[in-house]
Image (tube, rainbow, N blue to C red):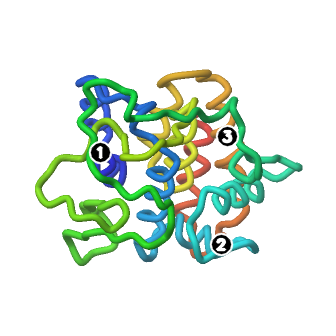
Amino acid sequence: MTDALLNDQLDFVQLLLEKGLDIFNFLTDWRLEDLYFATNAIKNNFFSRLFRSLPDDRANMTLQAIGNVLEQIIGNGYQHPYSTKQFDPHLRTVVDPSKQPGRNRKCWSNTGSADHSSEVRNSNDFGLLYVWIPGGGVRGNEEDDPTGWGEEVTTCFRYPYTELLQWALLTCRFSLARFMVLSGEEAIAKALLSVRILRGMRKFVDSESEVEIIKSLKAQEEYV
């Protein structure tokens, strides 16, 4: 699933969900950080440039840093849940994989730190296939863990499609973003959030060197 998201392969994402992948168990807090970190590690992509262009750029790709980025993008005093220091029970839930019967749990790193690695199958910066290895672990030829369970108590998101929507918008994976809007909870609220994020992203784009991106962002606003 992680590979399908990183490679913007909507068909594979839909297929995995149709085959029974539990998105609530898959999207842990540290796996979401992995997605942001993997995207930022790809040089010369829009997200990495956007992240560096903001005043509060941070070396470590944490959810709190992402929350700060979204606050600056949306503006108007918006407070993102990632930026709050206290645990928000309305947005997240804690699960104990040891109490879940029948789970084929694999050993994943649950550090959430920036010490990760990714394997790139092509030397180009565009149109690549990426295989993401969480926590720098070695997966070899094994398939991505469809359950999202680690060996320790894990924090999962109560609204995973909303979290993936924000990631897809910030990383310009617009087909995935549209799918996330229509999936799961509160489609109208997610559509309105999408417009606010897209409009905010245009403010931080260089109008001369990023003409195509500006056109793309405007088109997505109209589409939503």
Badge 3 vs badge 1, beta-carbon distance below 8 Å = no
Q: Name the image quarter holding residue 71.
A: bottom right
For numbered disc 2, what is the local secondary structure?
loop
Q: Which mark is residue 9?
A: 1
Report the front residue among 128 and 116. 116
Nearer to us in this view, 94 or 13? 94
Amino acid identity at mark 1: Gln
Q: Are marks 2 and 1 in contact (CB under 8 Å)?
A: no
Q: Which mark identifies residue 206?
A: 2
Residue 149 figure quarter: top left
The crowd level at tag 3 (other Cα within 10 Å; few <14, some 14-19, many 20+) is many
Placement of 221 over or under 66, stated as above or below: above
Q: Which of the pair 212/37 is nearer the observer? A: 37
Disc 1 on helix, strand or loop? loop
Name the residue rendered at 30%, 61% in the picture.
133
**Displayed quadrant of residue 17:** top left
Q: Position of residue 90 (x, y in %)?
A: 69, 29
Question: Which of the marked residues, 2 or 3, is nearer the chain's N terminus?
Answer: 3
Q: Which mark is residue 121?
A: none
Instruction: Please report whichever mark, 2 or 1, sits nearer to the chain's N-terminal start.
Output: 1
Tally the numbered discs. 3
Mark toward the viewer: 2 or 3: 3
Query: Looking at the picture, does residue 37 appear above or below residue 216?
Result: below
Q: Amino acid at mark 3?
A: Val
Which circle marks residue 195 in the picture?
Answer: 3
Q: Secondary structure at mark 3?
A: helix
**Mark 2 residue type:** Asp
